[in-house]
Amino acid sequence: IIRKLQFKKSMRWNSKATYSRPLRWIVAMHGSSVVPFSACGVSSGSSSLGLRSGFDVPRIEIPDAGSYLEQMKDNKIMVDMEERKTNIWNAAQALASDKGGEIPKDMRRELLDEVTNLVEYPTSIMGTFKEDFLKLPKEILVTVMKKHQRYFPVEDVERDQLLPVFVTVANGEMDEKTVRGGNEAVLTARFEDADFFYKLDMQKKLSDFRPLLSGTMFQKDLGTMLDKADRTDKLIAPLAKAMNLSHVEEIASKASHLSRADLASSVVTEFTALAGILGKHYALKDGLTLDVAEAIFESVLPRNASDIVPKTEAGIIVAVTDRLDSLVGLVAAGCTPTASADPYGLRRIANGMLQTLIQNKVNLDLKQAIAAAAEIQPIDVESEQCDEAHDFVVKRLEQLLIEDDAPREVIRSVLAERNSDPYLAVVTVKELAELYTTEDFAAVLASYSRPTRIVSGKDVDMEWKVDESVFQQQEEKELWDAYKAVKNELTDAFGVKTFVEASKVLEAPLESFFNSVFVMDEDDTIRKNRLAMMRDIATLPRGLLDFKSLPNF
């Protein structure tokens, strides 16, 4: 069990053992008895260690498993993570309340877990900083506190502004005055750095930073970040049209042109988490419209799996375009992820693009979009590499649907036929998941199963067009009329409900046909005509779902 535990980053020692940190002792007990075993070169026992106090590290003897939690707490180790988390949050909010503010609620999601895992016996301490620093953009101050120092910012919610205080969480008991002073000194130094860099940036326009992207390499075969920015600009128009968003193409083009410029700014170079945020801030400072500035910010969204996605139409275009260029270029350059490595974050890139399209209900033909991106790459992109990029995105889409608890057979059935438009695929999976266990769907499934089995493995002339003049029996004409009625109902991007309702008219004619008509007639023309009719009926679900992936077909 211990060896199978996985961490984002692990340490290796003794050339064999791998864990988040080197193991020094293991407590394993059942009742009052030690469960004997060895892992990573360490044998299990009944003693643990408490918090270090100077050079003293107290040894704790555990008499039985039932007393473990309380005994550790008595020795200043709060084992239960949820207890630590609640303790930290409540104590931090209480300190913030004393100053007339509160900890922003998003800190519970963005910072609390990390701080909880940094301490074993939390002690929350309030610190202060100079009010002059509040002249800096709020986002800079929060980023310095949260990302660099793991401090909780405190804000006046009614006025939507920060207070010149923060909450830090120390481990164990200590001299609060000394710890508070040390943390305040460190934060002051970080804020002074941020203030210096911000004042440097204020001397330029956002557009002045764009040429500086030529000094940052994106990928050796794909050029610099400036080269990438130029490619993204070229993709805006065709992708805006493909997403039926051409009415905001001008806004998207302006935003795209400046969307990566802040990467060359002094503040973002020092505080990379502010990419996009500072782009919006600098754009507004330069007098650009709010819709352009918002699209600049949204170009970096989502930054991780739990992040928000772009919401403005221009932001959607810019965000999808940027990720599509990265995806196609990096696959063509041979940077497709392996099972153990994804140095360019292609999985995150694909997931971000999919989440943006799906959550905003935007249709996009992936194959056409990938082809458009392939044309502007600085290296040749073969059709096989376009297919590889498409397949990679489809696999990420499949994983997202699995994580959303959709039945796997339903996912496979839909993605086998409808995988080029992610949003349409998701809608179809949800429809099919609701219907595929119903009696109506079972009846439709049965109706299509026999024509499909008849043509499967048969030498069917794919060029043969059904000729009504060759019909020998009334049942043939009735079935063909039913087929044409269904065909007329199935327009582009038809849904599962439409398909099921339309296909009901086939049930009775199919039953009559198979009761009265012998498909494999001795006459070559009649046989080919009847097989062609079975072929056409069997292909009606094409473009919607693959019945063969569903059980009982």
Image: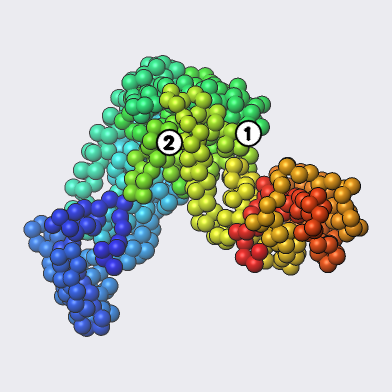
Query: How many residues crowd around disc 1 within 10 Å: few (fewer than 14), some, or many (20 or more)?
Result: some
Q: Are marks 1 and 2 in contact (CB under 8 Å)?
A: no
Residue name at image x 24 percent, y 43 percent = 183
What residue sits right under mark 2 in the picture? 331
- Left or right: 118 in relation to 327: left
Which quadrant of the view contains residue 326?
A: top left
Element class at badge 2: helix
- Left or right: 190 in relation to 155: left
Residue at the far right in the pictured view: 474
Instruction: Where is residue 169? Give x, y as percent.
Output: 29, 52
The kind of residue on which mark 1 rests is: Met
Relative vertical location of residue 294 with respect to residue 288 in this rendering, above or below: below
Instruction: Where is residue 191? Give x, y as percent.
Output: 30, 33
The kind of residue on which mark 2 rests is: Val
The quadrant of the picture occupied by the N terminus is bottom left
Which quadrant of the view contains residue 304?
A: top left
First in sequence: mark 1 vs mark 2: 1
Relative vertical location of residue 132 with respect to residue 16 in this rendering, above or below: above
Instruction: Where is residue 287? Give x, y as percent.
Output: 52, 19
Residue in the foreground of this view, choosing between 529 and 102: 529
Q: Which mark is residue 243?
A: 1
Element class at badge 1: loop
Residue name at image x 30 percent, y 55 percent = 7
Which numbered disc, 1 or 2, marks the residue closer to the eye?
2
Residue name at image x 89 percent, y 47 percent = 469
Residue at the far left in the pictured view: 55
Residue in the foreground of this view, choosing between 204 and 35: 35
